Image: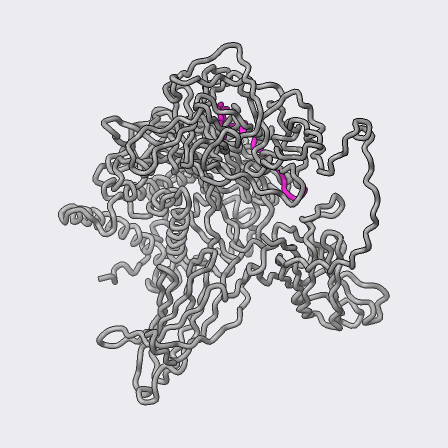
Amino acid sequence: MAMTIRRLIVEVVDARNLLPKDGHGSSSPYAVIDYYGQRKKTRTVIRDLNPTWNQVLEFNDGKEKPSQVFTDMLELDLFHDKNYGPTRRNNFLGRIRLSSTQFVNKGEEALIYYPLEKKSLLSWIQGEIGLKIFYVDEAPPPPPPPDAPLEPVKTAPPVDPAAESNGKPKSTTPVNTETASAPAAYQALPPAEEPPAAAEAPKDEAAPPPPAEPENAEAEAEKQPECEPSVAPPPPQPEEGPPQQPMQEQQPDFDIDFTTPRPVRSASASIPVAKVAPQPILRTMSTMSMASYASDPPDNIPIERSTFDLVEKMHYLFVRVVKARFLPTNGRPIVKLAISNSRTESKPARKTSFFEWDQSYAFSRDSPESSSILEVSVWDPPRGDVAADANFLGGICFDVTEIPLRDPPDSPLAPQWYRLEGGGVQSGDLMLATWIGTQADESFPDAWKTDTAGHSNSKAKVYVSPKLWYLRTTVIEAQDILSPVTALKEASFSIKAQLGFQVQKTKVSVTRNGTPSWNEDLLFVAAEPFSDHLVFMLENRQPKGTVTLGVTRIQLTAVERRVDDRKVASRWLSFEGNKDDKRVYKGRVHLRLCFDGGYHVMDEAAHVCSDYRPTAKQLWKPPVGTVELGVIGCKNLLPMKTVNGKGTTDAYVVAKYASKWIRTRTISDSLEPRWNEQYTWKVYDPCTVLSIGVFDSFEVFEDDDVDREAAPTRPDFRMGRVRIRISTLETSKVYKNTYPLLLLGNNGTTKLGEIEVAVRFIRSSPTLDFLHVYSQSLLPLMHHIKPLGVVHQEMLRSTACKIIGAHLARSEPPLRQDVVRYMLDADTQSFSMRKVRVNYFRIVNILTRLIDIVRWVDNTRAWKNPTATILVHALLVMLIWFPDLIVPTLAFYVFVIGVWNYRFRSRVPLPHFDPKMSLADTVERDELDEEFDMVPSTRSSEIVRVRYDMLRTLGARVQMVLGDFATQGERVQALVTWRDPRATGIFVGLCFVVAVILYLVPSKMVAVAFGFYYFRHPMFRDRMPSPALNFFRRLPSLSDRIM
């Protein structure tokens, strides 16, 4: 891969509405930009409050060479040039400060206007400046040509005193200082890349010492596991290939001493016992030396280490099989591993200069002290269709009690060469590494695991949703559509636009001159990378049907991006015939195309949304914290399917927050799976929701013979879902809770088990900044400047869900579309009588407090508690005589209510789905069947007729309520419309009398008199309705005119 240099490009476009600061009502502005210690200046625009520069400034990316002095903030200062005008100094016009996290790569940039900020509190600043900022990768300049070589000076080589005293010449071969300095107490196998020519060294040279293992062997083996450092001088000699005819003399002369207290027999039948069984290897302390991750970390890559402190540690025995050499075979051998009751085998080796596997295995361990024997054997399987047994090539046994324990941030254990035993006269060497670690080990995600049975689709993965954009297409007009012969006839035209599976049409335009106009916006959802074409088709409505007159296409990569509501440049596109063999001009269309990056493309319902950021990265704000999720396990799961007559469940968990999806590994055949996996998300808004779902996988059978034909089509079974609102979490507090897995179906609510999770929210922003988020808008600014309709927004959300589902289904392992749709609530927007009742009771619950206030007022009027009524009279007089106390009194009353309700707050750690509130236990089965029925309905005509009659009954009640609301409103209008002349005359005359009285009598006295009259004792009141209410009920409405 060619090396590139990253540079930051800042295009200073223009500025608007600057302050005049030259003393003559204008300014001559110029900009100064600082980035990582680099300062550049634009030219000066003379006497212009709306200057235009269109100047490009280039900076080196400071992230490649981090500095302890300069930060990653870009600062732009705007000044007035003192050389133009009577001023004696460069007057300050404004500044902006941007973080490098807001910058994008070339191709994603957009013109953004940033408001100018003050330098100090007393600064007088206004206006905004338009910038385009992006990164670009450039090829480095070619190196200069080398200078002419100087004449070499021949000097005698220095003589080694030790070599001179021994009378032996010093070898000119460079020696690896690290290897030479390493102690030779522990002698491992010689490296495989030692060339055979080393054995043919001249006899007059001193024999090199035996190669010792360097102190940093682990680090070297981790960096280059398949390419070891050569000890030969350049040019390097070719490596030794696999032997075609294994000979004894091809092996280097070395001896291995496997010293053990006593021989240990094979614990399983994986290694034949007829031959000499390999003995368990005892490690010395030198093999357990491990380096730390903190040694020489890259300066430009932050190291983030997960502590896995929310979940339980699960110990595993890790075995990494790298490669083998000197095996007496020309085939593709395999490696078999056995420990206790777990056995597995590797894939056939890749034949290079070695026999390579490079596979990792994780065997579950109850505790690090569990004692057993690990058997590793190499076998040569039969080739082709030959029915024969595999040939045993050798094996190794390890005592697990001697295997080292490793916890991150310890470096990975370096693989070592081990001599295979028991394979006969000709034995090879196997390079592997063994250690005991936890699920925090970096080898764990891709390793073969005992609890997943080694299925390829059972690995834990992290997915990222594609970046979605709203593509706004404004169809303005078309020209040259009709020929001159048919120009006098009226014709109906419309534009049909198609992007992938999305098809939209404009309204019909009727014209005679062949220039129809629409001025209509069409909105599509597009996903990066943009590889599709946007197709426009001109259609003519005719009596026999619709005829396509012309087609035009445009590549999405050529569409401009914007982040605000500014108008982009329009363009003309020519229509051509829809036949590829004949490209005839059919007219042209006037379009305005742009990607709206100021919107947030909704993929979730608004009340359970996990992200509200706009599409354009330049508009993102810094995160306010992180949320950590620990998926511990499930308990008491029900069997979801039957395999070989046995009920089983292959469960996995999917969690979604913002654009990041996680999927745990699939634990096979377990009703109480334990994952103990931990994940982290950045939080940009605390008023968001983290969604967690549990599924039963059917993909594990794709590699087996069980139901192979049904596996690709059968969806994964939904087992339940949990939602956690981030704003309900306290900072740095761990919430560990068990939630029931409830599934609502046609037969009611079913509990399929329980899931145990741990959640923690960590705030990273200052307290005031975090609280300031609550005062900001949830959705970006474009949703308020050009809002989208509710129906239109729901259609776009459905399209976004389909795009995300298709994108994640192409991953490996795939995240199925039915799982994505369930997590995004894309299939729960159908009509439900149960939800109608739930929403009705929610409204009644809200109005209960208002009803309680009305009842309290009625009880006060009825003097049921004379003491309270007298106090209300005194409070009424005080508030009327001192009206300035009304607002403070109300605020203090609300404060007291809030403090009082703190005692009765919910003690539930994290709220969950409420079956009682959802009416899931009391709903009738027919209503549930209607709720989960498809559209169009698949039920019989009789059932559909009954449902229609019930819907008509409900509609009649709604119609009656709406009629009552309309009647009351029309009676209010009838007060002054003289529909009833006598009633309007009474009302108008009464208003005149009230006005005269209020002019003559102070308003405070009138208010006190009215209050005392309203709270008068029941003995002074009549039981009949008041005259004012009787008068209002007699007013006419328009209900008598409805047919």
Whether 301 is among the magenta residues is yes
Q: Position of residue 783 (x, y in %)?
A: 49, 56
Residue nearer the viewer, 246 or 947: 246
Quadrant housing residue 395: top left
- Looking at this view, is 420 or 151 the one in front? 151
Q: Which residue is depicted at the point 38% across and 67% down?
A: 497
Rendered residue at 55%/56% (across/down): 999
Please tell me which residue lies in front, 914 or 229. 229
Asked if 132 appears above or below 1019 in the picture, the reply is below
Residue 124: tell me if it is visible. Answer: no
Quarter of the figure with the C terminus: bottom left
Q: Is residue 527 above or below residue 154?
A: below
The furthest residue to the right: 88
Residue 27, located in which quarter of the rendered image?
bottom right
Left or right of 968 on screen, residue 566: right
Q: Position of residue 341 (x, y in %)?
A: 38, 20
Q: Is residue 352 left or right of residue 939?
A: right
Q: Which residues are magenta?
A: 299-321
Q: Main secondary structure of the magenta part?
A: loop
Return the residue nearer the eye: 301 or 919. Answer: 301
Outermost front residue: 203
Q: Residue at x 84, y 63 (%)?
A: 89
Q: Is residue 237 visible?
A: yes
Image side of residue 179 versus residue 560, left or right: right
Residue 700 sits inside the magenta stretch? no
Question: Residue 875: x, y in percent?
Answer: 55, 37
Please state the total of marks drawn on the protein image: 0
